[in-house]
Every structure is written in structure tokens, then in C-alpha cells.
Amino acid sequence: MTTPRRVGTETSKTRAALLDTAEKLMLSEGYAAVTYRGVASRAGVASGLVQYYFPTLDDLFLALVRRRTEQTLGVLVEALRTDHPLRALWEFSNNWTAGALIAELTALANHRKKIRAEIAAVGEKVRELALEALSRSSNDYTVPMDKIPAEVLVFLVTSSPRMVIMEQSVGMSTSHAETINFVERYLDKVEPRTGPENAASRESDM
């Protein structure tokens, strides 16, 4: 009979410190640097101690995602309790550290199914909370009719499709269709297709 392997408790201060170390390592050197040896070296402990708390690297990465998820959702829920939820969402999304960590975890998720599911779940939850907050708001979110700077248009038109592709790669879908539809309707308004170009577009939609 095989004896179950002992695993460190989730409430351990040592475990929390190892997660802090792994997160800092990921931010400074990328997710590929987060190995048992890498975390142990940065923390000044034996690699066996890291493995004691996280028997597999997936366990380590999942713990990182889940801890960050708990922190993120807690901050967002509080931030959205305001009369200016869209501004709160903007400020929340402008956290460089959180953004950099999400980028690394998303890149990692493309190689690990378990991580992919976790990233998709938290991403969808964040969007769900934001949409609920906006739906409760009495603010008028009509886009002003001022001329939009070319720099802004270029950024939105080039970045939106890439973001959709990146999110779809980990299983997210909320707001994608609406965003693409909004951009395409805007393009139809400012640069309506004419002649052969319009005919080709209709044929491709059939």
C-alpha cells in the first residue's frame, strides 16, 4: 500500500512566502523561470521544500492564480461600489503589476490546460462584475461626437483583434462579439464599403 505524500498546509506562512517569491520571479524573469530550482534559489531554501508545498508545478501555478484571483476580485468588488464604475474599472485595469502578471499567466496558460481554465474563469468573472456595475449605473455612456484622434483609432483597431484572439486562446468570450460588432459598425459609418469591395464583403458573409 502506497503511503500518501505529505503536502504543506495552505495556511502556512512558508507557503505564502514561496508564492510571493514565485510571483516576483515571474514578473522579473517570465513564467519559464518559475521552476522548483528557480523559486528555491530566489527564496534561499532547498528545492525539496518548494516541492513539499507544491508537489507539481501545476500546483504551484494554480496556487498563484487562485491567490491572485481572490485578491483581484476583492479589490474590484470594492472599487465598483461607486457612482463612477467605468472610471473605477479604468483605474483598476491600469495596475502595471497585475497587468504584467496576467500577461505572463496567460502565456503560460497556452501550455497548461489547468491554468487555462482558471485564467478563463477569473477573466469572465471580472468582466461579469464590470458589466453588472455598468448596468446598475444611471450614467450616460454615449460616446461623445468629438473627433477621435488618429492615434487612438489606430491603437483600438489594431489592439482589439489581438486581445480577442489572446482571450479566446484561453477560453474567454464575454464581450468579444459586441466589441467586434461595434468597431465594424463604426467603420461602416466612417468608411462605408462601395462598389466591388462591398459586393465581396457581402459574398464573404453568405
Image (cartoon, grey):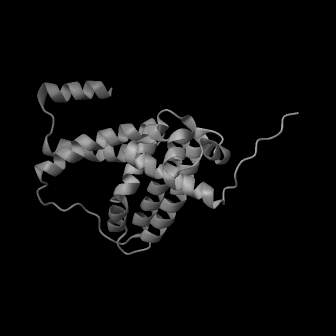
Q: Is residue 177 left or right of residue 141?
A: right
Residue 168 in the image: state x and y as whole percent.
43, 38
Give the quarter of the image for residue 163. Answer: top left
Residue 129 in the image: state x and y as whole percent.
47, 60
Residue 72 in the image: state x and y as whole percent.
48, 60
Looking at the rendering, in which quadrant would you find the C terminus? top left
Q: Is residue 61 left or right of residue 137?
A: right
Looking at the rendering, in which quadrant would you find the N terminus? top right
Residue 32 in the image: state x and y as whole percent.
45, 37
The residue depicted at 66 percent of the width and 60 percent of the height is 11
Q: Is residue 113 above or below residue 181?
A: above
Q: Is residue 204 above or below residue 190?
A: above
Is residue 110 visible to the viewer in this orientation of the structure?
A: yes
The residue depicted at 45 percent of the width and 39 percent of the height is 33
Give the quarter of the image for residue 148. Answer: bottom left
Q: How many marks?
A: 0
The residue depicted at 58 percent of the width and 45 percent of the height is 60
Q: Is residue 113 above or below residue 63?
A: above
Taking the view exactly as shown, the residue that stands out farthest to the bottom is: 83
Is residue 186 visible to the viewer in this orientation of the structure?
A: no
The residue depicted at 52 percent of the width and 51 percent of the height is 43
